[in-house]
Image: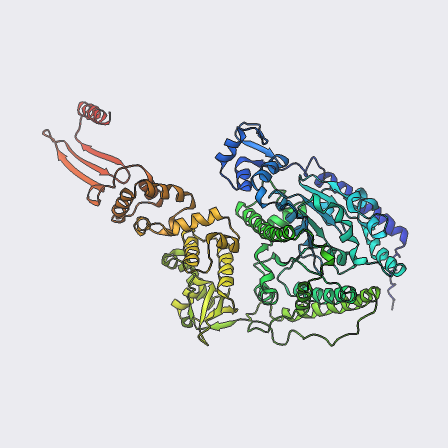
Amino acid sequence: MSTAKSIRQPLINLQDIAEQAALSAEMMDQVRSVMLNPTSRKQDLIINLSQLAGYCGVEKGTIIHRMTKGDLPTGNLNTTGSRREFSLAEARAWIRAYRKDKLRPIGAEAVTIAIANFKGGVGKTTTAMTLAQGLSLLGLKVLVIDLDPQGSLTTLFGILPDTEVTEEDTVLPLALGEETSIRYAIRPTYWDGIDLVAAAPCLFGAEFALPARQTQEPSFEFWNVLNLGIDDVRAEYDVIVIDSPPSLSYITINALMASNGLIMPLPPNALDYASASQFWNLFSDLSAEMLTSRGLDKEFDFIHVLLSRVDSAESTSDIVRTWIQATYKEKVLPVEIPKTAVASSASAEFSTVYDIQKYDGNARTFKRARDAYDQFVRYVERSLRAASDTQAAAPNSTTPSTRTSNLGKKLLEKASQVVAPRSPIAPAGSFAGREAPVAKPKTAIGAMAQFTDRQSAAIQEASRLKDQLKEYEGSLPVKRLDPQKVLRSKWSNRHEKSFLDADFEALKADILDQGGNVQPIKVRPIAESSDRYEVIFGHRRHQACLELGLPVLAFIEILDDATLFVEMDRENRQRKDLRPYETGVMYAKALDSGLFPSARKLADAVGIDLSQLGKSLALARLPVDVLSAFSSPLDLQYRWVSDLVNAIQRDPEGVLAKSKELQELDPKMSAGDVFRRLTEGGGTVPPPSKLMQEESFEGKSGQTGKMVFNAKKRTLRIDLKNVDAKQLAGLKAAIAKVLE
């Protein structure tokens, strides 16, 4: 019997690791030559006239007229001479001119925003980069500070952290006490309006430098280093965006303490949810130890939770989204960043959606991704403006870390009590309450040591929660309801014809085949009833189950009217079959009922431009006769609004007369033809009796014929028999004379 010899694996020593590091650096240089070369990827953004008008919030004609004054850049014609284009710097000059009332007011300094989360992979760096780019496209001057030693944000700017960033380019000299102002590390970037403080692996040294200084200098405040370091440049920027490491470290604490606002990207999955909960607990405890004992407090102007990397195909995402909404309430932004092929493609090329000038994939997918980031940026801009206005009103206010209001403490105390809701859709027994109080350490160093121990426990708890949620993967932790006891929302925008088309019949057939709706709808309890509910979204699925006599599968969530409306609108705009008229009806109901006091408040709440809201409302409020002229109001297009409204204002009686005549047609004209008839000047619609005319005739020498006139198609057909060449020539001459 032979014995197999074990094969000894070669040991790996430090020299091997050094060689691996060198190989990695060499390979990254090759990648950079393809992806990060300023001439190959990081090119100046080109903005066309339409895009510029959109950023400025004016019509193209306004831009064209203003160019005649010569006070703003005129751009250049493209190589074919077909359109005018502007560089990013030129476009920003226009944007700042037209949006000057929305920029930082006199007396205010830069608002500082920390992008933070307990763990990586949540879209933190992408959020920081796109926020900076989006705000710059609104005219703001942005400073970006990369505090993550991995330097991912630095890489997005086309700079290699390993080979192109030195210690002096990072905040490390600030942490070491060698510098007192961040100014030494600020560099311009390829993107006009954005400056950068880079990061590199050497930045990890700050995690040793800061506690060492604390030990040597008892009065040293390690959490206040960055806050004091940026004081010197606050007046030069509109906003400072800080990308923090994916942990609650000394550097992260500095980022949070230096900031006016906090944004937490949070994907709707269990592991990230649990990690976020621990983040708040640990931050609360640590900040209390550092500040409360010194009679100080911390106040944020705003805290936003951004649902990021949302995968609609993930079966448990709706469950965790409900937990997040119940936990963070108004802090959750009413916009979600979808996980799309666009984002993956951009990430693979070390870029973002704002870097993409021409997308090779699905245009609709790109628009969905870009629109989501645009909405996110707009929401943040409003928070920035509110913070700036507060500063301007109190010019003597102190820096963020030394404010003495109790608001911050209350926020942190509230956040530290984050526990998932025990709702009908949550797995029973999944969440434990707060642990027994732990003795507080007496020093900041002790607090960080205790934090390290708790961080490990937090990771274990997050993993446990994720494992528990897996038990529900693929199942339906929701409630089956009697569809008779589920009512349509009073804000519903579904037109009756949307329940009659072929798509609805296909949906019914699919639900019948599967024995019910596999994709749950969302409902809320009706306050005055114990067993009745109102649809938040999923009206067609509910109607299908109602007609089929099947129970309807539903998530249940308690929402007030305003929150329900915003969530419904957000879900509606993600639907592929959403019709402009239906959207307008929903917005009109909200205004007419007083849910929102003005169109501007409504536009702000749902995150759309006021002009777009105006188009939707104009469609919904067209006269009934005009709507009835179309086969279905669902056929109406946004691009028709202006012409229809102008036609009605120009000749209201004429348009209504044509509308009533068009209603009588059988068959109905196409939507495009109806639009053209209503908006063309003068004339009426031929009556039904004259739409199709047919006349037969017989000649003296045995010729027979038939003439058919189609008024709808504007055609004349003549069929002749027993006609010779001479007679045909005479007929042609007669027709030609008529057409003269």
Q: Is residue 351 visible?
A: yes
Q: Position of residue 237 (x, y in %)?
A: 69, 44
Q: Position of residue 674 (x, y in %)?
A: 32, 44
- Between 31 and 705, the residue placed more toward the observer is 31
The image shows residue 435, relative to residue 52, as above or below, that is below
Q: Residue 262 appears in which quarter of the rendering?
A: bottom right
The image shows residue 300, relative to residue 460, as above or below, that is above
Q: Residue at x 78, y 50 (%)?
A: 229
Q: According to the image, what is the colour scheme of the structure?
A: rainbow
Q: Position of residue 622 (x, y in %)?
A: 35, 49
Q: Is residue 149 left or right of residue 123?
A: right
Q: Position of residue 740 (x, y in %)?
A: 24, 24
Q: Is residue 26 visible?
A: no
- Tell how many labels: 0
Q: Residue at x 47, y 46 (%)?
A: 611
Task: Locate the N terminus by quadrant.
Answer: bottom right
Q: Is residue 478 left or right of residue 10?
A: left
- Between 463 and 22, the residue placed more toward the observer is 463
Q: Residue at x 62, y 57 (%)?
A: 306
- Between 179 and 9, the residue placed more toward the observer is 179
